[in-house]
Amino acid sequence: MGLSDSRYDVVVIGAGSAGLAATRTAAEEGLSVVLIEASHRIGGRAFTDTESLGFPFDLGCHWMHSASLNPYVKIADSHGHAYLKNSYPRQIHLGDRWATEAECDDCVAFSDRCHELIDGAVAAGRDVAVADVTPREDRWTPMFDMASSMGSSVDTDQISTVDMAAYNDTDENWPLVDGYGALVAAHFADVPVALNCRVERIDWSGKEIKVTTPKGVIRAARAIITVSNGVLAAGDIDFAPRLPDWKLAAVASLPLGSHNRVGLAFDRDVFGPEVQNGFTVYNETPETVFLQIRPFDRNHVVGLYGGRFSDWLERSGPEAMAAHAIDNLKQVFGNDIEKHIVKTTCSAWGGDPLVRGAYSCALPGHAGARKKLAEPIDQRLFFAGEATSLEFYATCHGAYLTGIATAHDVAVTLGADEARRKAV
């Protein structure tokens, strides 16, 4: 049976964490559901590359953030996927030396002070830029800005104080040994999905919704749209009629910024047991990189970037991205280290036409946009994904939770009650 041969209760658009969770939940609610995905794979921004370096390397989601509240921890346990219980290392390399313990403590104290100022602004009702309420001339300002840009994918002049403070951070960031993308793919392997099926048009002008794809027109009573906010903002999907102004304003207020990862594989362990497992190479400029050294005891290094500098590097190309990470490694370990690099890879989410960025951040003055983005239109067009999460945005589990909640909401509008579910 082809996609266009049946009418469904709900069509789910996008097979990332939100769309996959929504599809499974809708089916459990007894709804007839079809999931369509423009890419050749599922997972969206959760993607584990197993080819480029010769072992699993997450190009997107990697840590199970806020782990004690993260449903993917239990999912990982159920699938036998190993993870480490740790948080980000806070060591710093300063130009030609390691920072002292006192300097590291001072950096952490500065970050804590910045977050107190952000919380104070929020308590005073100020939804302004993080940069407007944090010190701009301190020695550690670029360090705080770099960490903020990796967490929010944009720089501090673009981050809403209210949005940043709303994130539910338990400081538990547990990396998956064989990849977050691999876990998502394994957990949802049994969910039927039509791949390579890009949505061209969503016509919601009539009683039923018509979704036009290269594989035919899908008819459904409801639609759950989980594509990235970057795709929505770019207008890659034609809505007829167009989305209302309040919805478009919410989309525009939650831009996707840049967060990328560089992987460098080595022919041997060139670091030894005494080297820190992660640190920031800090030259007191915005061009800062966080480096993970031999994660999971594999002979590789990971460089992490965020914000405008990440975007600039991505636009400069993969060679430039790798070169920056290598130059910073050489600054710490000497020039000879480069000759042991055998493979490199990097993400480039801004240039992916099916994503168009890393993850969402509310602009100053627009923290309420997430709630607006999540609101359904006419109780027929529903929206889910990390950008609609109020407390776990920018995360894989945040997207997952919104997918489940939205599918339940759809079921309510269709009258999917307990008796119906038992009959399926």
Image (cartoon, helix red, strand yellow):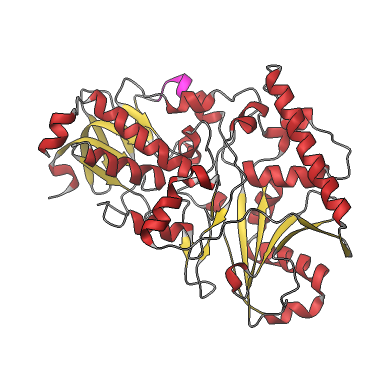
Give the answer, above or below, for where 175 lies relative to 108.
below
Give the answer, above or below, for where 422 lies relative to 85.
above
Residue 404 in percent (x, y) is at 35, 37
Q: Nearer the viewer, residue 145 or 323?
A: 145
220 sits left or right of 37 in the view: left
347 sits left or right of 235 in the view: right
Q: Which quadrant of the structure image shows residue 134?
A: top right
Give the answer, above or below, for where 38 lies relative to 406.
below
Q: Nearer the viewer, residue 25 or 131?
A: 25
- Residue at left 41%, top 42%? 400
123 sits left or right of 221 in the view: right
Is residue 90 among what the camera can see? yes
Main SS of residues in magenta: helix
- Residue at left 88%, top 57%? 100
Residue 93 in percent (x, y) is at 82, 60
Is residue 307 among what the camera can see? no
398 sits left or right of 316 in the view: left
Indicate yes or no whether the magenta region holds residue 63.
no
- Residue at left 69%, top 42%? 148
Write down the region rendered in magenta.
Answer: 243-247
Residue 206 in percent (x, y) is at 23, 23
Question: As drawn, which residue projects farthest toward the left?
Answer: 423
Residue 186 in percent (x, y) is at 35, 59
Give the answer, above or below, for where 257 lies relative to 272.
above
- Residue at left 18%, top 37%? 30
Q: Nearer the viewer, residue 403 or 112?
A: 112
Instruction: Tally the numbered discs.
Output: 0
Q: Quadrant of the C terminus?
A: top left
Question: As drawn, which residue projects farthest toward the top?
Answer: 125
Q: Nearer the viewer, residue 39 or 405?
A: 405
